[in-house]
Amino acid sequence: MTEMSHPAEKPAWLRRLPLIAIGLVAVVGAFTLRDYLTFDTLAANREALIAVRDANYGLTVLAFVVAYVAIVAFSLPGATVATLTGGFLFATFPGALFNVVAATTGAVAIFLAARWGLGERLAARMDQSDGAAKRIKQAIDANQWEALFLIRLVPAVPFFVANLVPALVGVPLSRFAVTTFLGIIPGAVVYTSVGAGLGEVFARGETPNLGIIFEPHILLPILGLCALAALPILLKAVRGRKGV
């Protein structure tokens, strides 16, 4: 069937335009914003930020969430600093809630851009292909919930990668959004709580311990959640070998 029979289908360049725009903004932002979206910038402007928050709490929340969404959606530097800022301005709660909502919204934006530009056609080609590509796609489809939770819970998986890969293998939007929201809660709560204690850190002239998530009392519970998420995958694999 020729392209003439699909008059409503968007040209390839138009479908990829959002993804191209994200890529361009990410590259420009990496060079122009990396010296601004930093802990030092937060420390230098902490009193002004608190004054703005106290003068108009609702507007500050809205501006913070919009800025955080933009940072995630365009893969800009400063996501960790944004999470710390959420804790610094709004305490662990509701700061963690604002952080999770903003990060999930930004992740959904880049997921949709990737799926619209590449993911739908790539997933369809994997389904129609033979060999390794199709087997990989089928394995992912059989364990989508577990796999999505794992890539969110494991601290070593870059957030950008965890946003793109599901879009390229045909994961449903609702499933992606739910697992993103729930899966990032543990890490978000940890870093938001660090941000909530920044007042004392600033007073001592120190920098926050961003490696806290790898300390045993934090890392072990997260690894426990990873094990729970991986358990169904292991059970399915064992049953498959036994022919159950």
Image: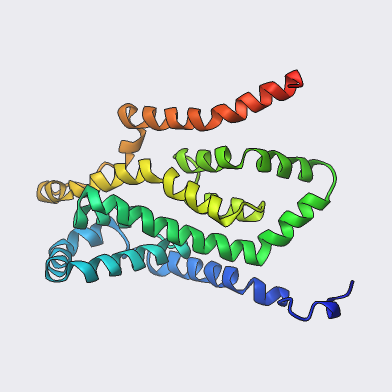
**Render colour scheme:** rainbow
Q: Is residue 137 above or below residue 31?
A: above
For the point 67% across and 26% down, the residue is 237
Q: Looking at this rendering, what residue extends furthest in the front direction?
A: 244
Residue in the image at 23% along x and 49% along y? 93
Q: Position of residue 174 (x, y in %)?
A: 54, 54
Depth order, front residue of 147/190: 147
Position of 159 compared to 96: left or right? right
Outermost residue toward the right in this view: 1
Residue 53 located left or right of residue 216: left
- Considering only vertical position in the picture, is 12 above or below 166? below
Q: Residue at x 33, y 55 (%)?
A: 99
Provide residue 96's location: percent of width, then percent of height: 29, 50
Q: Quadrant of the N terminus?
A: bottom right
**Rendered-image quadrant of the C terminus:** top right
| Residue 57 screen position, x and y as percent | 18, 66
User: In this rendering, is residue 44 above or below 134?
Assistant: below
Based on the displayed image, in which of its 4 quarters is residue 52 positioned? bottom left
Give the x, y percent position of residue 74. Answer: 47, 65
Single out the residue that lies furthest toward the top: 242
Count the labels in the image: 0
Task: Residue at 52% x, 38% y: name it.
Answer: 150
- Quarter location, residue 6: bottom right
